[in-house]
Amino acid sequence: MRVDRTFAFVDLCGFTAFTEAHGDEEAVAVLTSFRGAVRSIAADHGVRVAKWLGDGVMIVSGDGVAVVTSVLELHQRVVHEQLALPLRAGMARGPVILFEGDDYSGRAVNLAARLADAAGPQEVLATMPVGQLVPTAAAAIPAGERTVKGLPAPVAVCRLVAVSGLALLAG
């Protein structure tokens, strides 16, 4: 079945090195805090955690604004709570195949994952259509075109940033 969805891939930067330097117990504590924040924010905005990816997560929804807001709030929460590791994220939207009822296949999924891989620490990259979905407490800053592995042409991207301090945090 073909559906239109917005996807975000979010992960913690430097998790493997952190684990090596600080040990498994501290790494698990960081991961537990991260996952707790993801679950709370996802529930607040009605987005779905499609899958956990070790120190990362794939978030999906038919409501693109909810995905954008969720990722920006997650980013702010990680900064505000001084989690030991910064996050990075990539977002894209578009038609995909809903496969076997709970998995997705298509360009938007692949593009969101590749943008997350390309993002630096504390950077949220998105396609321009996703950038148009930012709430008023955020901005989409054009970041040029990026060559994305597996795609035949560069993709125009933007960086999403909160512009109102912690105004996105919902309590």
Image: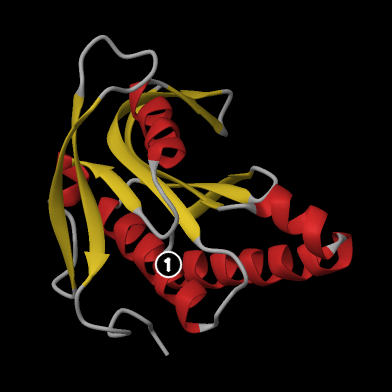
Q: Nearer the viewer, residue 61 or 123?
A: 123
* Side of 99 where 76 appears, left or right: left
Task: Name the image quarter holding the N terminus.
Answer: top left
- Residue 147 in the image: state x and y as whole percent: 27, 22
Q: Residue furthest top?
A: 152
State the image coordinates of residue 119 (x, y, percent, origin top left). 39, 44
The residue lying furthest to the bottom in this view is: 171
Q: Which residue is mark 1?
A: 75
Does 162 appear above or below 110?
Answer: below
- Side of 88 relative to 38 (left or right): left
Residue 157 position, x and y percent, is 20, 39
Front residue of 154/65: it is 154
Tell me what residue is drawn at x 66 percent, y 51 percent.
55
Amino acid type of disc 1? Answer: His
The residue tagged with tag 1: helix, strand or loop?
Answer: helix
Above or below — where is 2 with respect to 157? Answer: above
Residue found 45% across the figure and 34% down from its top:
113
Q: Determine which quarter of the picture holds residue 74.
A: bottom left
Q: Quadrant of the C terminus?
A: bottom left
Q: Residue at x 55, y 80 (%)?
A: 82
| Residue 27 pos. (x, y %) | 77, 62
